[in-house]
Image: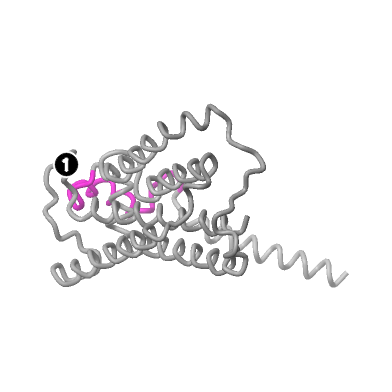
Amino acid sequence: MNKKIAIILLLFISGSILLFAFSGIQFGKDRMYVGKYYIENGLQKTGSQNLVTAVVVDFRGFDTLGEVTVLFLAATGVGALMYSYKREKDKEKFREEKEASFILKVSTPLLFPLIIIFGFYVFIHGHLTPGGGFQGGAIIASAFLLLYIVFPHLFHELKSFKVIESLAGLTFVGVGLLGLIVGGFFLKNFLPKGLPGLVFSAGVIPIIYIAIGLKVGSEFIGILDDLRRRD
């Protein structure tokens, strides 16, 4: 009986707390003014027509830098995990259990450059249209995944992508430090914003998105290469 009374009392107290908490909320009224500020001032403050890009790269650029860092740590973890499985004695041998079809062999040389171009388009125009560095980088990596599936013998040494990844990361951080020096805080959009709607607009945002796109694409390709060495 005491246990039932304790449960009823606990439910009563919890219900009272919830009732008191929700009674102060005026349902139907917007209590979050941050989103309203972004919508009304995003274009003016950043020069980016894509409001999502304005938020991701400018208003909360630190968070985006953290996301890129998390992806880097994930790629490093995969590389460390797969390192012990590398088969150094079979560098020239690749799996050939199932050869790619004739259609794939013919279409891949045509599709590969188109996918690369589309990936670049997505992150270069990220401040104008839906898209961005993460999406564009993933698209570019998918082109190399297709290349590996169809022509694995071409997917061998990818050291150049490690250089691209490093340079892209340094560019992101370097732009942030320049903002600190010029504007007084990290990732300050210190370049002229230009005319909204043009490719060369929105200040440093396109530069950051290009760096993110190259870094994300290189990291995904690196993960793919590490997994390939495991096979």
Residue at the image position 40 percent from the left and 65 percent from the top: 66
Q: Secondary structure at mark 1?
A: loop
- Answer whether residue 102 is magenta in the image: no
Q: Amino acid at mark 1?
A: Pro
Q: Is residue 97 left or right of residue 212?
A: right
Q: Is residue 61 left or right of residue 159?
A: left
Q: Provide residue 3's location: percent of width, then percent of height.
A: 84, 70
Task: Please state, as top left, top right, bottom left or bottom right, where the N terminus lies in the image.
Answer: bottom right
Q: Provide residue 202's location: percent of width, then percent of height.
A: 19, 49
Residue at the image position 37 percent from the left and 57 percent from the top: 215
Residue 144 vertical placement versus 57 (above, below): above
Category of crowding for the residue at label 1, using alpha-carbon neighbours closer than 10 angstroms: few (below 14), some (14–19), many (at least 20): some
- Quarter of the image where one finds residue 168: bottom left
Q: Is residue 214 left or right of residue 75?
A: left
Q: Provide residue 15's location: percent of width, then percent of height.
A: 64, 60
The answer to which of 208 and 103 lies nearer the viewer is 103
The residue stretch that appears in magenta: 27-48
- Quarter of the image where one finds residue 63: bottom left
Q: Residue furthest top?
A: 103
The total of numbered circles placed on residues is 1
Task: Please state, as top left, top right, bottom left or bottom right, where the C terminus lies in the image.
Answer: bottom right
Residue at the image position 55 percent from the left and 63 percent from the top: 78
